[in-house]
Image: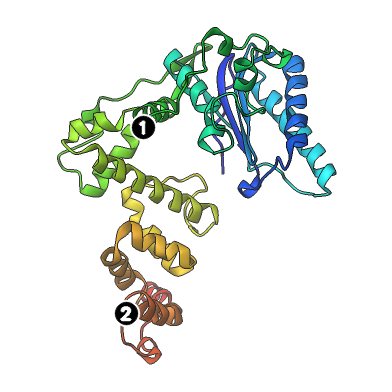
Amino acid sequence: MPRKPRIDHPGYYHIINRGVNRQNVFLEDEDKKKFLEILDTSRETYQFTLHSFCVLDNHYHLLLETKRTNLSLAIRYINSRYAAWFNKKTDRIGPLWQGRFKSWYIHEEEYLWLLLRYIEMNPVKAGMANILGDYPFSSSYYVVNRLRPDLLSGSCLYEKDIRNWLLLSGDELESMTNFQSVKIEKQDDKIAVKNRLPLNEYFSIDNTREQRNDSMLKAFMDGYKQSEIARFLDLSTVAVSRCIEREKRKNMLFREIRDKGLFWSYSSDIEYGPEKKNILIETILKYGDMSHIFAALDLYGKRSVYSVWQQCIRHDARFKKLNYFIARIFFNQDVEAAEFNEVRNARAEKLRLLAG
């Protein structure tokens, strides 16, 4: 599917990359040391400043500052060099990383310091260290122990006393998520935060509940805090959080079905909306696997799934075996297979009507 062009502009970036299928790609200390060697070489080659890093077992975090428009080149170099070394060492073939790396442009100083704490506290949160500075494959190890390797030359971590840093609170994690979701755009060769719509333009009094929940997700992805959305709609933050998470899951399910090519008539970059609910459920019932059907039942409820089945599939002879299975397994109907033998073939019926 077409990808949005990556922001590649001088500035601060948070970079994450994971092993394919979330598998471990750093099996022992030697692997992490090799990755840091490659990171140091790339820092010199591509002339960026590394402010923070944390190398865990199946992924890494970097916070770096570029002076040129070469971010993608630098990270591709790091990933490919390490993958080649690791594959040779372990006698494996195939991709090592889970797709292209993720990057976020850091547009505010508050975001920068929240992110630094988040990265440095990762080993503590993961149970790989007791306190900040204990984990030797994170930048805080060098800062707390008053070491200044070339790798961290110019790092802003040395500007503050980080020894008393704690894990981010729930509110701080929400703030960081909101910072990450802000849309950034390039304007006249400069980076700017894309202007948000007022909250009242996301919601209408005529909206159905599904449209309202979809609008919650859009407002959240445009940078509004869940607490702001909750106040506007006079709902609890817990209710808003649950709605947003559910909408995210619907979007993920839709993209999974789309990327499998199961939507025959949809383009490869189509996105989910409430108006596509029925076609999503119908496609899952016809061509999805069991996990997709269970996900649809969980997200939309048994009544909605049953309604789509009744309207779109039950009376189609092409799916008589499937209909028998669905009726008995998912809707607890005490029916026999013969009940679906006499239903019409919807496609043949349509062709007959057109011919007439």
Tell me, yes or no, if residue 100 can be seen here: no
Q: Where is residue 233? Give x, y as percent.
A: 18, 35
Residue carrying label 1: 170
* Left or right of residue 113: residue 172: left
Question: How many other residues sit within 10 Å of disc 1, few (<14), some (14-19) or many (≥20)?
Answer: few
Question: Which mark, by number, is residue 12?
Answer: none
* Residue at left offset 63%, top offset 26%: 138
* Residue at left offset 59%, top offset 28%: 15
* Left or right of residue 27: residue 127: left
- In front here: 221 or 187? 221
Q: Residue furthest front?
A: 130
Q: Is residue 112 above or below residue 177?
A: above
Q: Is residue 312 above or below residue 332?
A: above
Mark toward the start of the polypeptide (2 vs 1): 1
Q: Quadrant of residue 286?
A: bottom left
- In front here: 195 or 351? 195
Q: Where is residue 253? Give x, y as percent.
A: 44, 53
Q: CA distance from mark 2 to mark 1?
A: 42 Å
Q: Is residue 296 above or below residue 351?
A: above
Q: Quadrant of the C terminus?
A: bottom left
Amino acid at dot 1: Gly
SS for dot 2? loop
SS for dot 1? helix
- In front here: 101 or 132? 132
Question: How many other residues sit within 10 Å of disc 2, few (<14), some (14-19) or many (≥20)?
Answer: few
Q: Where is residue 42? Give x, y as percent.
A: 75, 21
Amino acid at dot 2: Asn
Q: Where is residue 280? Give x, y as percent.
A: 40, 58
* Count of numbered badges drawn on the protein: 2
Residue carrying label 2: 332
* Residue at left offset 45%, top offset 62%: 292
